[in-house]
Image (spheres, helix red, strand yellow):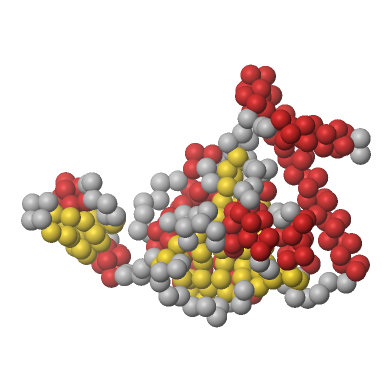
Amino acid sequence: MAKVKKVYAIKYGYDNLKNCEVKNIIVENWNECSRLIKGVKGAQYKSFEILQEAKDYLSNDKKLLKKGVDKYPMDILHIYVDGSYNSSSEKFSYGLVAVKNDVIEYMESGASEDTSQKQIRQIAGELKATIQAVEYAKLKGEKKIVIFHDYEGIYHHALGTWERKDSSSKEYYNAINKYINEDKIEIVFVKVDSHTGDVYNEITDSIAKKAIGVPLTDAVNKYIKENEIAVSGIEEEIKLKGITNERYYCNIKNIKEPSKENNIEIENSIDMLDRNELIIKRKEIKEIYLNVGTDKLKSKLNKLKKQELINLLIEFVKLDNE
């Protein structure tokens, strides 16, 4: 397509001169665009050098759905995504939880290898989680999925309605649109409010936090204390128990009914998860000391409650004597 002088497509704005909303128009200069979108809550616009792309953008009326408000398919794969950030190590992490018919069938989390994305903190993890989620769906042969997310950019960066300023959002846009256009996977985006008790969202948040040693909230334990959660397979049972107080293990139901031998494997794996979390914490404390010195380390440790500090020191001693 031939390029033209840059144009601005405005999906939503407001004309203060005429006292009316502005929807789905194209203007030819920034001054006019700025007048219609500046200070407007919820304004949506984008610049283009190809006129047809601007028209396509305006014709795409796909709406961001909200859980608990809008309707979406219930009988297909649902995947929850989230990210976290450790301000001490300056690394991000991601988590995803795949659910079908109220059974957790897959859980995945991971941490960044370096600090190159620290400027966007947990957002890098949110974007990574979504790419991994769609890749999982692709490997399973799923052609339509629902992605639940608490960061609104998951939807806007996929559709291109938000400007992509960093490498993560650009890579995300390209990856998601490849899945949509080449692999023909239909994605329904659903916004879920964070930390409001949505159990699958809380589980996703917890496994992302655990991947980089960020303290967990008690939301999963509060839910599972009173309710059962179904999982499919040993690996998912291990991962869920890894973020749950052992008093509530009885409410985690593995629909594949693990054998006694598998129960021993689960217990050993949970112990290893806990040990790895302590190793992460010890590395984090060491990095603080090496990078910024004793004062910063004291500040970090002073934030811990007395019993938390005692428990941490006891566990470190155990690690050293293994």
Residue at 51% x, 56% y: name it: 196
Q: Quadrant of the N terminus?
A: bottom left
Q: Quadrant of the C terminus?
A: top right
Locate residue 225, reporting x and y percent: 68, 60
Q: Quadrant of residue 78?
A: bottom right
**Is 57 on the left or on the right of 66, as rendered?**
left
Q: Is residue 160 above or below residue 182?
A: above
Total count of labels = 0
Q: Is residue 296 above or below residue 35?
A: above
Q: Is residue 278 visible?
A: yes
Q: Is residue 207 above or below residue 23?
A: above
Locate residue 106, reporting x and y percent: 67, 67
From the viewer's side, name the closer residue of 20 and 23. 20
From the viewer's side, name the closer residue of 212 and 310. 310
Q: Is residue 96 visible?
A: no
**Is 191 on the left or on the right of 58, as rendered?**
right
From the viewer's side, name the closer residue of 314 and 124. 314
Q: Quadrant of residue 212?
A: top right
Residue at 64% x, 56% y: name it: 222
Residue at 82% x, 50% y: name it: 272
From the viewer's side, name the closer residue of 5 and 79. 79
Locate residue 7, reporting x and y percent: 22, 56
Q: Residue most toward the front? A: 226
**Is 224 on the left or on the right of 318, as rendered?**
left
